[in-house]
Image (tube, grey):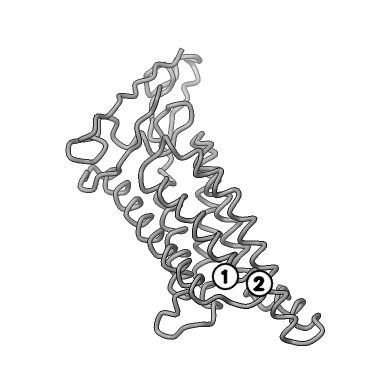
Amino acid sequence: MSINNYKHPNLKQQWGLVEDPNGSDHVVTSKGHRLTRTLTAGGHEVDSSQPGFPIYHRRIANPFPLVCIATGASLLMLGFVLIRHRGITNPAIYMAIALPLGMIGNFAACMFSYAEGSTYLATISGTLAGLIGGTGLLFLPWTGIQSTYVLGGANQAAGVAEFYKASAMVFFISLIPIFLIFLASFRTSGPVAGAALLIVVALGCLGGAYIKGVEDLVIAKASGALFIVVGVSLFYAATSVMLAEEGWKLLPVFPLPRLE
């Protein structure tokens, strides 16, 4: 029978004013197990269930920082495009980060999260990989998504308007799984839960900016600003966990308290 060694952090420990009693255990776990556990259930490096054939446990790296960096970089680029940073209005550059890092990076983290036994991290990384990669495909020419709408309309203006409305539906539907992820994030950490909530709000704004068939620049810029905040928050979370993994507990991770 497994023993739950989780210790409830006090307010100072939650805000990083003193050392976290659980180390990096709070990040994303399944049934309260540490992601970095290298011992067997019996408490030893060598499994004693089969004395003649011991099973050695290899440590799998924590995929959480990769999820944060892949998602944060993709949303940060999207945010800068939406706010028209340096006059850039063409969102095609978003694919340069969204497809290799946002999609493939998150998928890689998803596979190893399943191996770690972390249901939550596997779910969010797989979901984000699909959503970020799918959004990038909207601007990839050889997919034919844009041309299907633009060339299939009564005229070019009508086709562009229909494409905007269809894209808004994608953003609104993407909001739903992210909201479910937010509801399940109350036992993770402050930056993770906050980023999930801001992504929900940003996707709602982004869908509202295009649902009428024309771009509402003010709402689109508001969405971009939220994505920038999300990107910075996720970069912080990734850095704090990587430093903790290397033994440098310089940045607080802001763990959320558990009820168990």
Picture residue at 44% right of the left edge, 86% below the top: 87
**Circles 1 and 2 in contact, beta carbons < 8 Å:** no
Residue 34 horizontal/vertical position (percent): 39, 31
In the rendered image, the vertical position of residue 66 relative to residue 74, given as above or below: above
Label 2, secondary structure: give it. Answer: loop
Q: CA distance from mark 1 to mark 2?
A: 8 Å
Picture residue at 81% right of the left edge, 80% below the top: 152
Q: As rendered, which of 15 and 248 lies closer to the eye?
A: 15
Q: Quadrant for residue 104, please give it.
A: bottom right
Q: Type of residue at label 2?
A: Lys
Picture residue at 46% right of the left edge, 12% below the top: 1
Picture residue at 49% right of the left edge, 16% below the top: 52
Q: Type of residue at label 1?
A: Ala
Residue 121 horizontal/vertical position (percent): 49, 42
Residue 160 horizontal/vertical position (percent): 70, 80
Q: As rendered, which of 157 and 133 lies closer to the eye?
A: 157
Q: As rendered, which of 12 and 208 lies closer to the eye?
A: 208
In the rendered image, the vertical position of residue 245 relative to residue 6, given as above or below: below
**Label 2: which residue?**
212
Give the tally of numbered discs.
2
In the rendered image, the vertical position of residue 56 relative to residue 61, given as above or below: above
Q: Residues within 10 Å of mark 2 (few under 14, many from 20)?
A: some
Residue 182 horizontal/vertical position (percent): 49, 44
**Label 1: which residue?**
209
Residue 147 horizontal side relative to residue 35, left or right? right
